[in-house]
Image (tube, rainbow, N blue to C red):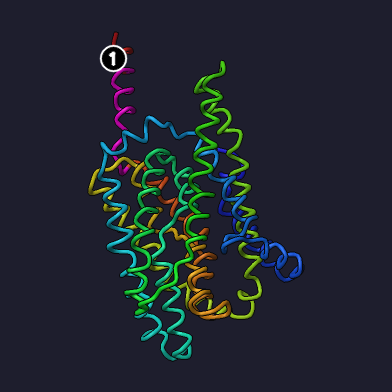
Amino acid sequence: MGLFEKYLSIWVALAIGAGVLLGTALPELIESIAKLEYASVNLVVAALIWLMIYPMMLKVEPRCIAQVGRRPRGLFLTIVVNWLIKPFTMAALAILFFKYIFAGLVPAEDAAHYIAGMILLGVAPCTAMVFVWSNLTKGDPAYTLVQVTINDLILVFAFAPLAGLLLGVTDLFIPWDTLVLSVGIFVVLPLAAGIITRFVKLRGNGGEESVNSLAAKLKPFSIIGLLLTVVLLFSFQAETLLSKPLRVVLIATPLLIQGYGIFFIAYFGAKLLRLEHRVAAPAAMIGTSNFFELAVAVAVSLFGLTSGAALATVVGVLIEVPVMLSLVKFANRTRHWFPEPEEANSASVAKAGTEAA
């Protein structure tokens, strides 16, 4: 385990502090970087996330993608948690906290906007960062890819009806450019790059070992990309964090409960289904993480850039990395709760037979 990965929580804490410091010390520079976006997707952050995803895509074997359908339980779990549970628990928690528990702490109009922003997060499960979390938990690359792809296909058809139902909006604007661009940048392009790289490497003399060697060499850059992403995300919102700390804490409270709650529902559901850990961990991560580019874009289009709804989606962005890293650590420590992969069992049997002979 490398230096970055071993002390990742400490590095992320330092990155958060560096982001807030940069946002307050060099606001003009950070603002200029924040403006480098297209269809609500910041191009600098997109490049960093791409850097994080690419090493995992190197491990995707095209022939393994076709075999995922033979193990449908993980896909079933992903669909149920993301689309039949997560949107409704998020709406319920948002209403509970901002209509009742926090009712006297914020104006009713602001509370309604915070609820709307959290609902948008709840209806937008992850597309990009889940590949990072899957990689850190040694998830099955091919299975994770199929889980994310199915999630994205459902998202195209279910986001507007679900968000409209929970928000009470009949004519919901969907930023298709944000949706299509995000899927292209975070799924299609890194997958194509990974498959082409595999093909070139396998055609050479190194074979599979050369692919694994390249992925190992790129792994530190993936972690650096994660840390730089944290720096940028917190620098973009440094002013909000420092000017509205109480509002940020209030919004973060139900979001934290939702994030950890959804993870444990999915994770223990996977345990009951006796899924392998390399399938169970990414399945739980997809529901916990959010497609924040889409949520932020819709919040801004519906309620405005300075609205409480936009603020709520931004808080979701800010808490995601620390929350997910804590869950990555938990998932890695509980790997023994799940059955070993079939090939690992076969290898153990073969090894035992060899030793006995």
Secondary structure character of the magenta stretch overall: helix
Q: Is residue 340 magenta?
A: yes
Q: Give coordinates of residue 63: x percent, y percent.
A: 38, 29
- Residue 94 visible in the displayed image: yes
Question: Is 42 on the left or on the right of 142, as rendered?
Answer: right
Quarter of the image where the N terminus is located:
top right
Question: Residue at 59% of width from left, 53% of height from top?
Answer: 46
Q: Give coordinates of residue 226: x percent, y percent.
A: 59, 51
Q: Is residue 34 magenta?
A: no
Question: Is 134 on the left or on the right of 232, as rendered?
Answer: left
Q: Which residue is mark 1?
A: 353
In the image, is residue 219 above or below residue 202? below
Question: Residue at 41% of width from left, 41% of height from top?
Answer: 139
- Start-end of magenta stretch: 337-351
In the image, is residue 295 above or below residue 212? below
Residue type indicated by callout 1: Gly
Q: Secondary structure at mark 1?
A: helix
